Structure formats: C-alpha cells, structure tokens
Amino acid sequence: MSTTDSSAALSADVVLIGAGIMSATLGMMLKELQPDITIAIFERLDVAAAESSDAWNNAGTGHSAFCELNYTPEKPDGRIDISKAIAIAEQFEQSKQFWSYLVEKYQVTGVTRFINHIPHLSFVWGDKNVEFLRKRHAALTQSPLFKGMEYTENHAQMEQWMPLVMDGRDPQQPVAATRMDLGTDVNFGSLTRGMFTLLQQKPGVSFYFHHDVDKIKRKEDGRWGVKAKDLSTGETVKVRAPFVFIGAGGGSLPLLIKSGIPEGQGFGGFPVSGQWLKCVNPEVIAKHHAKVYGKASVGSPPMSVPHLDTRVINGKQELLFGPYAGFSTKFLKKGSYLDLPLSVKLSNMRPMIIAGLKNMPLTKYLINQVRQSPQDRLAALREYLPEARSEDWQLEIAGQRVQVIKKDEKQGGVLEFGTEVVAAADGSIAALLGASPGASTAVSIMIGLVKRCFPQFANTPEWEAKMREMIPSVGQSLNDNPALVEQLRAHTSAVLGLNEPAEAVAK
C-alpha cells in the first residue's frame, strides 16, 4: 500500500498520543480548565482503552493501599513505613473526586458504572507474616485515611469475610487478615471510553484511531510536529502543536526516544507480560466478594503480589487469581517482538545492562514463571484456595507492562517499579512511563503534569478555582484533615454508587 502525505500540517493546542486512561484524564481535565482548547488524539488501534487500560489487561483494583502489602515495607528496625500508602490513598481519593465531578456534571450512562464497591482484604499465614500484618494494621489505623480497617486472627471471622479462602484450610495454621470495607473495583476500560465519549461531544477535539505515530520532531517555530500513518489507507496526518503528551503505555518509551529531548536520554524499558487464572465456574464465583491480596514470595518483585480478585466487568461478576508473570520482547500486547531490541540505543545501553545485572533475581523469577506448568499454577492458587479444582479455572493472557530503567549517577542504572513522568525542561512535551499504581492515580499524576507543563495557566485564579471545583482536596493533606476525609468520601460514595455491594450490581 502506498503512503500519501497530507498536503499541510493541521494545528492543535495539544496532541495526545495513546487513547488510554492517562490521555483521557488529561484531555478531559484540560477541556474543563479551558473549554476552547483544541486537542488531537492519536491511537494505534481502532478502539480506545484496548491495551493496558482494558479491564482484562489491568489489575482493576482501585489502588488505595488498603490491601497492597508492598506499599508498606518493613524497615530494618521492624517499624512499618506507611508513607507510600498514605500518598497513594490520598491520590486515589483525588481520582474519585474527579470522577464524581464528571458523573455529576454530565450524567453519562457509560461513565456511571465503571466503579463498584468491593471490600479490600490482606491475608497472610505464618507467625512472621502475622506479626507483620498486626504491626501494619496498628500503623495504618493511626491515619484517618485507613479509619475502619478491621484486623483479625480468628478463623471463624475470616470464614465470614472470605469463605473460599478458609474452606479446607488447616485450623491450626496461624493466619491473619485485615479488611477495609471501603475498597473498590474499577473498570478502567469503561471509564476511559466514557471520558472519550464526553470528549468527542466537545468542539475542537479530533480523534485519529488506527493511526500509528512514527515521527515527533521539534520545528523551527518551537512547536512539535507529529506525523502519523493511517494504518487503513496508508495516508499520513501531520499535526503541529505547542504541547505533546505521550501516554501510550508500553509504547511511550520508543516515542520519547524519537522526540530527541535530552531528558529522555538514558531511559530504557524492561517488558513483563502478565497472566491470570480466570474462574469459569459460576458457583465458585458467587461465593467470593472481595479482593484478597497476599504477600509476595521472598525475592520476587512487587508486581508479583498474588491476589484473589473479584471483578465486575460489563455488569458481570468475575473471579481472577494471579498475576503469573511471563516474558515477551513486546512493549504492548498487540505490539512487535522487535520492540525491546529496537529500544536499545547508545544513550540507554549502559543503564540497561547495569540494571539487568543488578536485577538477576527478577530474571530468575521470570524464567521460573515462564517454565511453570498448569500444576505449578494450581499449587500457587491452592495456597489461597485450598479446595481449588483445575477444571474451574482457565489461563488468560493479561496486558504488557514496561518497567522503567533510568540512568543513575551513583548506580549507573536503576529498575523502577512505579510510574514516572519525563518532561522537557520547557514543559512542551511529556511522556508517562511505568506501571502500577498508574491508572488509579491518573488524576493526581495529571494534576502534577498540568502544573509542570502549563505553569502560565495553572497558577491563574481561574484555573486554580476550577481545579478545586473538580478535585476539592487538591493542595490539601487529607491525612491531616479527618473531617475533610469523611466529608469527601461520603460525597464520592453517594455519587459513584459505592454504597451498593458488587453482587447487587452484577447481574
């Protein structure tokens, strides 16, 4: 198929690359802050939210640090560090506030059922882990963000909270659990598509689906030239804009490298694929109504934290267990096996090699995961469901994650497991790299990006007032304001329908 250039470059104020949760959040936020802003959105696939934001590719937990034990590490002196948990809990509250604002303002049906009430539980066994969970609970409940978290070592109490997990378990086994009733399950695919539906109805927003961005270059006038190929016709579309956001999930790193900004040099990526065991027995699914997170095995990475996960997808209750890791050189689930080798450049080769050598346990972990047999995966499941039967579960491929590798003056190269915004010094282009808990904290990430990349507007009284209208807690510490936590949670729970249990929503 021949390639035909469009005659002239189009103009926009903002170009968003990737139709996932990050681009949807930023686009919606900017349109609310400045209604006359023009936005061009490019997506390589023919639908929105089909990669990392899709319900089957994303963990789906509203990451609020209620149950994720890797957010509360134990220090060498035995104390529990809850600083990261508090930060993530505050960020998720900001997300709920923004979503509530959209639901109240637009009353769009597709937006209102993306989030459901699902209790969040942590579950551990063994004397050492029980002691850790006891200390974690004591530390977290000092914060108003974790008010109401319950703790028990009583088997009978746990049987009420998670009957499947306790069914067939040794009654002499030392176990402990915490439960936070305020937990949520989020279908980020539905949420993303809902926000794009709102954006499509607004003037000045152009969508280019099935378009692959292959060039990003700074022009003489200071604007960015973005060129994309229509994968259906072979024609190209060119857009010039003073600001570009690269929110393409695993595809962000190659585009950041193409931009040529100095801030992007030295970054690399390490792809990790995910797998789930999906329950196919409706009777088993109906017996579990919680997200139960455990503790990662010694030596395994944070991304491997096992969980038994109740999900509501398209109005139907589902049950997953995992994740099981795999390895692929693809940066996207529907990407190319050449993604990893083509991302290696002179500028990032040294950090990638050094990070690889320093993370041999991760390599060993991935090799062992890839070599797992169905019996191995069932054995891991039976640590959480002693009575699990292989015929009730089937293996499903989840999404691709690309963990960030970045230069470090002291260590040479560091492998990061969180999210990172890389922006040009002048704020004219920014890319989001990394993985969890990205989607859950997208609103907080985009608040920071707006302040960083649009400082001339972000500090005006008009934008500041609008930001507070959308996200009332912005600029405030919820951890220091118990009354505000109660007030905002009551409001968002009412607006988002979080007072209903998930089993009442799923049909």
Image: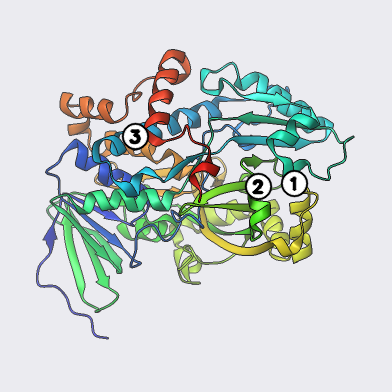
Residue 206 placement (x, y as % from top left): 19, 58
Nearer to me, 386 or 274: 386
Going by the numbered disc 1, the residue's amino acid type is: Tyr
Question: Which residue occupies 55% across, 29% down?
Answer: 85
Gap in angstroms between the C-alphas marked 1 and 3: 35 Å
Residue 384's label in the rendered image is 1
Q: Quadrant of residue 103?
A: top left
Q: Is residue 468 something that shows in the picture?
A: yes
Going by the numbered disc 2, the residue's amino acid type is: Leu
Vertical position of residue 313 compared to residue 470: above or below: below
User: How dense is the environment of label 3, judged by Cα within 10 Å: few (below 14), some, or many (20 and up)?
Assistant: many
The residue that mark 2 highlights is 308
Q: Is residue 404 something that shows in the picture?
A: no
The residue that mark 3 highlights is 100
Question: Which residue occupies 21% across, 76% down?
Answer: 235
The residue positioned farthest toward the bottom in the image shown: 1
Under circle 3, the secondary element is helix
Under circle 1, the secondary element is loop
The residue positioned farthest toward the left in the image shown: 7
Residue 475's label in the rendered image is none
Left-right relation of 113 to 173? left
In primary-sequence order, the first of circles 1 and 3 is 3
Gap in angstroms between the C-alphas marked 2 and 3: 28 Å
Vertical position of residue 406 compared to residue 178: above or below: below
Circle 2/circle 1 CB separation < 8 Å:
yes
Going by the numbered disc 3, the residue's amino acid type is: Ser
In primary-sequence order, the first of circles 2 and 1 is 2
Under circle 2, the secondary element is strand
Left-right relation of 441 to 278? left
